[in-house]
């Protein structure tokens, strides 16, 4: 999937669904990878473009969804456009 064609939030939602994760399950995995709590509400806000994840959260998202470095850079560019 090309990150430049659609929003970060939509990409996140699609990749989360591919991994068969609910927002709550995804939040739990990101929390574990980050070492700090991330709520289902935060995931929902990211997907709807209401809030952007921090850099640390982005790295945790990269880990959970197995994004490669190019995908992460594209995600950062999308967030910068918000």
Image (cartoon, rainbow, N blue to C red):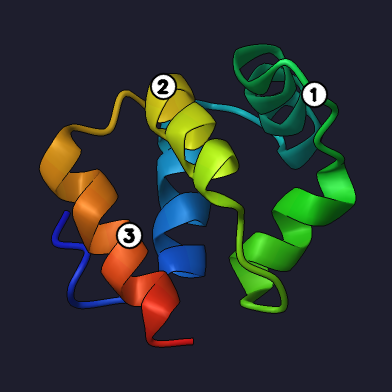
Q: Is residue 39 left or right of residue 21?
A: right
**CA separation in Å, label 2 and label 3:** 13 Å
Residue 75 position, x and y percent, is: 32, 59
Instruction: Tell me the element at label 3.
Output: helix
Residue 32 position, x and y percent, is: 70, 12
Q: What residue does disc 3 label?
A: 75
Q: Is residue 24 left or right of residue 71?
A: right
Residue farthest toward the front in the current orientation of the protein: 55
Instruction: Tell me the element at label 2.
Output: helix
Instruction: Please tell me which residue is depicted at 22% across the width and 54% down the height of the picture.
Output: 73
**CA separation in Å, label 1 and label 3:** 21 Å
| Vertical side of 68 occupied by 82: above or below | below
Instruction: Please tell me which residue is depicted at 48% across the width and 43% down the height of the picture.
Output: 58
Q: Is residue 53 visible?
A: yes
Instruction: Tell me the element at label 1.
Output: loop
Q: Residues within 10 Å of mark 3 (few under 14, many from 20)?
A: many
Q: What residue does disc 2 label?
A: 63
Q: Are marks 1 and 3 in contact (CB under 8 Å)?
A: no
Q: Earlier in the sequence, mark 1 or mark 3?
A: 1
Q: Residues within 10 Å of mark 2 (few under 14, many from 20)?
A: some
**CA separation in Å, label 1 and label 2:** 15 Å
């Amino acid at each position: 999937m090309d990150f430049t064609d659609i929003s970060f939030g939509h990409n996140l939602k699609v990749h989360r669904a591919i991994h068969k994760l609910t927002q709550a399950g995804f939040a739990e995995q990101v929390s574990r990878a980050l070492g700090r709590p991330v709520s289902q509400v935060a995931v929902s806000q990211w997907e709807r473009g209401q809030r952007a994840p921090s850099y640390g959260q982005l790295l945790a998202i990269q880990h959970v969804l197995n994004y490669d470095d190019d995908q992460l850079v594209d995600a950062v560019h999308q967030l910068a456009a918000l």
